[in-house]
Image (tube, grey):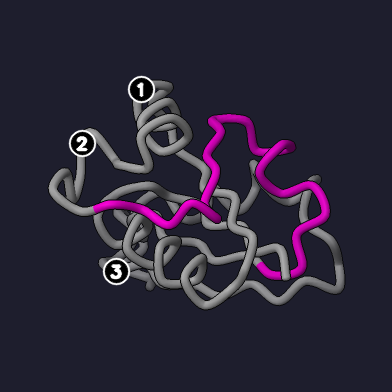
Amino acid sequence: MKVSVIGAGSWGTALAHLLGTAGNDVMLWARKPEVCEGINELHRNPRYLVDSSVSERVRASSDYETVLRGSQAVVIVTPSSIMRDVACDIRPFVSEDAPIIICSKGVEAGTGLL
């Protein structure tokens, strides 16, 4: 199964690794190009969990369309404070059939919503 993980912090990297070791092909969205390079070339996130390796089934890109193309499930692991913006940004690229799993923490500034 192809799974897309949006957010390459500690939690997103750990979930992407877990999904990869479970046999899924994982595309990880990272904002920073150096994180993508570290994941793709060294199988390590140079900013988070630096002492841990990342499954070779995990690839990374900073382009939403690349990460979400053909995805059968989407895991969003960004802070809740930017969830609404991220959801709007990825909407054009997410299949209507793909389940979306939200693994964010915190509340949205201004509304207090999860």
- From the image, tell me which residue sits under label 1: 34
Q: Nearer the viewer, residue 110 or 21?
A: 21
Residue at figure coordinates x 36%, y 34% from the top left: 42
Q: Is residue 7 left or right of residue 105?
A: right
At label 1, the amino acid type is Glu
Mark 2 to mark 1 CA distance (whole Å): 9 Å
Residue 103 screen position, x and y as percent: 41, 72
Q: Residue furthest top?
A: 33
Residue at figure coordinates x 64%, y 41% from the top left: 89
Foreground mark, 3 or 2, reads: 2
Give neighbour class at mark 2: few <14, some 14-19, many 20+ (Cα, 10 Å): few
At label 2, the amino acid type is Arg
Residue at figure coordinates x 42%, y 49% from the top left: 7
Per the image, label 3 sits on a secondary structure element best described as loop
Asked whether the viewer can see residue 85, the reply is no
Magenta segment: 53-73
Quadrant in the rendering for residue 64: top right
Mark 3 to mark 1 CA distance (whole Å): 24 Å
Residue 47, numbered label = 2
Q: Is residue 59 magenta?
A: yes
Residue 105, numbered label = 3
Residue 43 screen position, x and y as percent: 37, 42
- Whichever of callouts 2 and 1 sits on the residue coming sooner in the sequence is 1
Residue 79 screen position, x and y as percent: 33, 56
Eyeballing the image, is 36 above or below 7? above
- Whichever of callouts 3 and 1 sits on the residue coming sooner in the sequence is 1
Q: Nearer the viewer, residue 25 or 29?
A: 25
Q: Nearer the viewer, residue 23 or 76?
A: 23
Are dots 2 and 1 in contact, CB under 8 Å? Answer: yes
Q: Is residue 98 magenta?
A: no
Give neighbour class at mark 1: few <14, some 14-19, many 20+ (Cα, 10 Å): some
